[in-house]
């Protein structure tokens, strides 16, 4: 089993100045190679802390990927940190320096003296060309003692791969150079496929009760992730091919749908509002919507939603009647919230008549609008599914 850890480097990430998107991208790439990701971590621009994190990761995992800290300034510490982690010095590499010179020349400039720092890498490192940026990347291979099934200590090799923090550069080098290297180095011949089933209408606890036995499986694995108003069920399978993995996932997918029924509303990139609007369109139904107190949340999900302040339960229905009559639509739906009570009232008008429903919320008050939005959209979805 080939394992990996990801270390993102940069104080600006820890301070919340930028969002780390590299970890997610690398994780999905590793997943596609059949590599098990053990940990991810973010470290500020401190050589000692980075070196310690890298060394610890290399002792645990076969592959350690770092991003960031490869620039030309003093506060770009990754080269020194990797060298310290593996117990070597850095060395100047003329071939990497020529890469820097050639890249900068494309912009009609000459490199400054401090940019020579980018041509220093840990001794013995494998240089990786960066055709889309000025920071050369590198791979360091190191052997660690490893228990060998009762035959004393064997040897396990671990690699640290240092990539740029700029997402476009990182993604290019990852696919062009790193993925082929990893496939050859670790004989990667498996894939990990993941499918997300999106659920609405049942909380995480109730879903867990219905599929608890599936969550104990080892391959495929099944896990839950709760979001405001939506619960995701993750099915992940490792196999020798995509087809084999998909068959394994399909079997679990079918079992989950049998147990949860229409609670499952979509897969992977599906969104609740898109599924609902597509269902309306498929049935040839037109819609009017009203929100009150949601600060435009419903309007951003459902086009032409009217925002009306301070609606009471009674005035919500009156507003819906008026809006439906004016627009001549088949369906009208609305929601108004009452933050002091942590509650919301939903109302709907269809060919079957009028109905309203009060719901109470026990979560953070600031999440009430978003929670109410998803509940009213799911209420609409289930109502439309039942309509002829």
Image: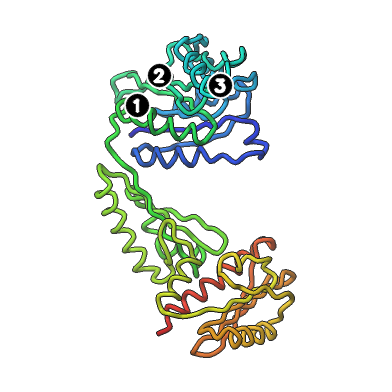
| Callout 3 crowding tier (Cα within 10 Å): few <14, some 14–19, many ≥20 | few
Which of discs 2 and 3 lies nearer the camera? The answer is 3
Residue on which the image places disc 2:
141
Tag 3 or tag 2, which sits nearer the N-term? 3
Closest to the observer, 163 or 376: 163
Residue 149, given in percent of the width and then of the height, sits at 29, 26
Q: On the picture, is 363 further left or further right than 132?
A: right
Element type at mark 2 = strand
Residue 48 appears in the rendering = no
Residue 225, given in percent of the width and then of the height, sits at 49, 55
Which of discs 1 and 3 lies nearer the camera? The answer is 3
Residue 242 appears in the rendering = yes
| Callout 2 crowding tier (Cα within 10 Å): few <14, some 14–19, many ≥20 | some
Tag 3 or tag 1, which sits nearer the N-term? 3
CB-based contact (under 8 Å), mark 1 and mark 2:
no
Query: Looking at the image, is 373 positioned above or below residue 114?
Result: below
Which of discs 1 and 2 lies nearer the camera? The answer is 1
CB-based contact (under 8 Å), mark 1 and mark 3:
no
Which residue appears at 31% of the width and 44% of the height?
A: 238
Residue on which the image places disc 3:
108
Residue 242, given in percent of the width and then of the height, sits at 28, 47
Image-quadrant location for residue 338: bottom right
Of all residues shown, which one is farthest toward the front?
Answer: 108
Residue on which the image places disc 1:
181
How far is mark 2 from mark 3, CA to CA? Answer: 36 Å
Which residue appears at 42% of the width and 54% of the height?
A: 234
Query: Looking at the image, is 339 positioned above or below residue 38?
Result: below
């Amino acid at each position: 089993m080939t394992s990996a850890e990801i270390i993102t480097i940069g104080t600006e990430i820890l301070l919340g100045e930028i969002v780390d998107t590299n970890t997610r991208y690398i994780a999905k790439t590793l997943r596609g190679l059949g590599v098990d990701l053990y940990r991810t971590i973010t470290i500020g621009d401190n050589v000692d802390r980075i070196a310690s994190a890298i060394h610890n990761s290399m002792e645990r995992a076969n592959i350690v990927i770092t991003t960031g800290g490869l620039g030309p300034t003093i506060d770009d510490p990754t080269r020194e940190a990797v060298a310290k982690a593996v117990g070597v010095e850095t060395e100047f590499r003329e071939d990497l320096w020529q890469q820097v010179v050639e890249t900068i020349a494309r912009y009609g400039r000459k490199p400054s003296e401090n940019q020579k720092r980018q041509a220093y890498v840990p001794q013995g490192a494998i240089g990786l060309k960066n055709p889309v940026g000025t920071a050369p990347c590198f791979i360091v291979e190191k052997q660690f003692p490893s228990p060998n099934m009762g035959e004393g200590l064997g040897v396990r090799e671990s690699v640290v791969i240092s990539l740029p923090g700029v997402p476009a550069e990182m993604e290019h080098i990852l696919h062009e150079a790193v993925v082929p290297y990893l496939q050859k180095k670790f004989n990667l011949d498996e894939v990990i496929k993941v499918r997300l089933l999106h659920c609405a209408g049942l909380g995480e606890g109730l879903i867990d009760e219905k599929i608890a036995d599936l969550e104990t499986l080892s391959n495929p694995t099944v896990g839950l992730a709760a979001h405001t108003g939506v619960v995701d069920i993750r099915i992940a399978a490792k196999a020798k091919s995509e087809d084999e993995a998909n068959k394994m996932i399909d079997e679990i997918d079918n079992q989950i749908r049998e147990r949860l029924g229409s609670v499952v509303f979509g897969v992977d990139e599906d969104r609740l509002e898109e599924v609902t609007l597509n269902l309306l369109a498929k049935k040839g139904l037109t819609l009017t919507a009203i929100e009150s107190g949601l600060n435009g949340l419903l309007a951003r999900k459902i086009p032409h939603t009217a925002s009306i302040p301070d609606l009471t339960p009674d005035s919500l229905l009156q507003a819906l009647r008026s809006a439906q009559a004016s627009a001549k639509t088949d369906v009208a739906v609305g929601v108004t919230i009452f933050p002091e009570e942590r509650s919301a009232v939903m109302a709907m008008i269809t060919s079957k008549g009028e109905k309203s429903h009060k719901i109470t919320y026990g979560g953070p008050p600031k999440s009430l609008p978003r929670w109410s939005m998803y509940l009213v959209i799911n209420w609409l979805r289930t109502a439309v599914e039942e309509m002829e």
